């Protein structure tokens, strides 16, 4: 009796349950395989579409490059044609120039003595030029004296405001250090400026004689500007330089 009950339980409960479980596992496995297969198919299709898009882009770029190359080729052909035309014109001009030169040579085969004299640069260069040189020399000397006068006047006017060192005077007049030192030494020896030896470097100030000299120079300049027809008086700064 017990054996029959157990067999009934096995036949109607356990065996169907195990069978259903096995079928469920099998169905789940089949579903997973189908799902993986579909996923792989989707990935493959996506990659294929991307490759197709890249191929289309490359084709478009290739077509664009081909079009640009064709345009450049056409322009090159036109440029070559223009160069050929220009070369032909140059050859024609060369022929015309050669023919014109030949005709000019044939017309000017005989040169007059006067033309030979004019065309010879050695004749003009052999003429004496001491008058021109002396005139230029006098002009350059006058310009140098005028510039020297302006420099001294400018220094004295600057020293009216404050004392300056040789280096500061050099910056003001824009001359070399040696030239400035010689000039300030000359002004000091002529008692136009005074030298303060208690400081290093020495500082220069304008003296009473320097102020008088500056006043005379200013008066002489105003007199020469207001009366240009009158004879020029001797510039006091010129006497100082000499």
Image (cartoon, rainbow, N blue to C red):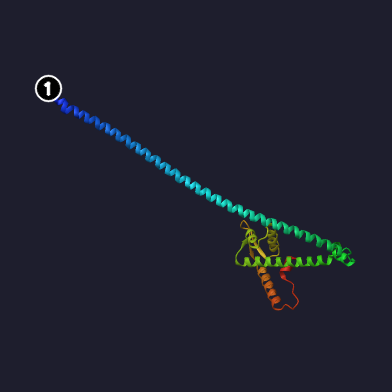
Left or right placement of residue 113 versus residue 138 in this view: right
Density class for disc 1 (Cα within 10 Å; few <14, some 14-19, many ≥20) is few
Q: Secondary structure at mark 1?
A: helix
Query: Within the image, what quadrant is residue 12 found in?
Result: top left
**213 sits left or right of 50 in the view:** right
- Closer-to-camera residue (122/88): 88
Residue 237 visible here: yes
In the rendering, at what x and y percent does residue 37 appear?
35, 36
Residue at the location (27% across, 34% down)?
Answer: 28
Q: Nearer the viewer, residue 69 or 201?
A: 69
Q: Position of residue 29 (x, y in %)?
A: 29, 33
Q: Which residue is mark 1?
A: 4
> x, y percentage for residue 1?
9, 21
Number of numbered discs overlaid on the protein picture: 1
Could one spot residue 125 in this view of the protein?
no
Give whichever of 99, 204 is nearer the camera: 99
Picture coordinates of residue 149, whole percent (x, y): 70, 67
Q: Is residue 179 above or below residue 23?
A: below
Quadrant of the image containing the C terminus: bottom right
Instruction: Give the residue displayed 65% in from the left and 67% down from the top.
Output: 154
Q: Nearer the viewer, residue 101 or 26?
A: 26
């Amino acid at each position: 009796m017990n054996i029959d009950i157990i067999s009934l339980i096995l036949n109607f409960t356990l065996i169907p349950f195990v069978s259903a479980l096995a079928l469920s596992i099998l169905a789940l496995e089949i579903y997973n395989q189908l799902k993986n297969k579909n996923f792989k198919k989707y990935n493959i299709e996506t990659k294929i579409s991307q490759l197709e898009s890249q191929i289309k882009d490359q084709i478009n770029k290739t077509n664009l490059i081909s079009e640009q190359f064709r345009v450049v080729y056409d322009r090159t052909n036109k440029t070559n044609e223009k160069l050929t035309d220009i070369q032909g014109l140059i050859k024609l001009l060369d022929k015309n120039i050669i023919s014109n030169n030949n005709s000019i040579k044939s017309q000017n085969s005989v040169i007059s003595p006067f033309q030979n004299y004019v065309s010879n640069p050695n004749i003009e260069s052999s003429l004496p030029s001491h008058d021109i040189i002396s005139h230029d020399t006098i002009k350059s000397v006058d310009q140098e004296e005028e510039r020297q006068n302006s420099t001294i006047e400018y220094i004295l006017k600057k020293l009216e405001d404050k004392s300056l060192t040789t280096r500061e005077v050099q910056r003001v007049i824009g001359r070399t250090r040696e030239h400035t030192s010689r000039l300030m030494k000359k002004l000091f020896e002529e008692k136009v400026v005074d030298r303060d030896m208690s400081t290093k470097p020495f500082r220069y100030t304008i003296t009473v004689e320097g102020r008088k000299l500056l006043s005379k120079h200013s008066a002489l300049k105003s007199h020469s500007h207001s009366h240009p027809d009158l004879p020029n008086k001797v510039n006091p700064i010129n006497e100082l330089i000499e």
